Amino acid sequence: MPYDSPDLASFEHVENRTLRRLIGYWLDKRGARAMPALGSVDPVEIPWALGRIWLCDYLAESGRFRYRLAGEFVNSFWGRNIAGKHLDEVFPPDRLKSVAKKVRTVRQGPAIVHDRVSLTLADEIAKSGERVMLPLSDDGENVNALLGASQCDWLRDLEFDPFVTLSETTTVTAV
């Protein structure tokens, strides 16, 4: 019998079509499990998401997450290739605490975390973005990796600019 909660209708709040499709893919891949295994994620099946996805491995010995891969859009956002880097090597200290808390929520829940971010630039131009973090588990119980995707209207990390107003809404969905 398939795992019955959540379903795609639980994610109507996700505005970006690519992120919703990725959630649907994740839901299909989990089958009767609470969450899919890392090995069940096949890049050939999700070419429409490749530029926006990232994979992080959980390193139990250190309790840290390390990026296994990141798509072109994600690397462009950071201005460098983040594959092989730990979260604390990518995010500035003022944002790391918030991001690390969300990653822990995904791992410990386990849960799906969705963020919606709105920025107002100094010239009052509004920008928006979304991110989804999905748990992966080789044993079906313990999260050992994250599949994520990010979408935003800007190509550099403006949220760290002091002339920007930032608002963020986070939705956590237990799996």
Image: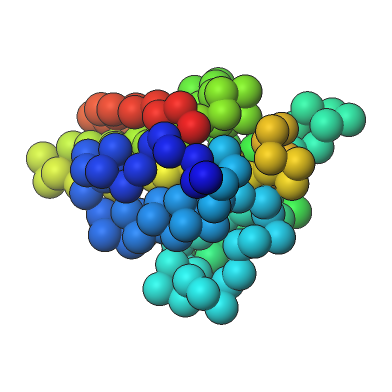
Query: Which quarter of the figure has residue 16?
Result: bottom left
Between 7 and 51, the one nearer to me in the picture: 7
* Residue sticking out furthest to the right: 61
**At x 56% / y 23%, what residue is drawn?**
109
Up the image or down, 137 lies above or below 96; here it is below
Q: In the rendering, at what x and y percent does residue 29 appear?
A: 54, 57
Between 107 and 5, the one nearer to me in the picture: 5
Q: With 73 as the anchor, is 88 left or right in this view?
A: right
Q: In the rendering, at what x and y percent does residue 72 appear?
A: 51, 69
**At x 61% / y 62%, what residue is drawn?**
41
Is residue 78 visible in the rendered image? The answer is: no
Q: With 45 as the anchor, is 145 left or right in this view?
A: right
Q: With 6 as the anchor, is 13 left or right in this view?
A: left
* Residue sticking out furthest to the left: 124
Q: In the rendering, at what x and y percent does residue 68 appear?
A: 70, 55
**At x 51% / y 74%, what residue is drawn?**
45
Up the image or down, 157 lies above or below 91; here it is below
* Residue sticking out furthest to the front: 1
Query: Which quarter of the figure has residue 135?
Result: top right
Q: In the rendering, at what x and y percent does residue 134 appear?
A: 51, 43
**At x 50% / y 46%, what residue is drawn?**
2
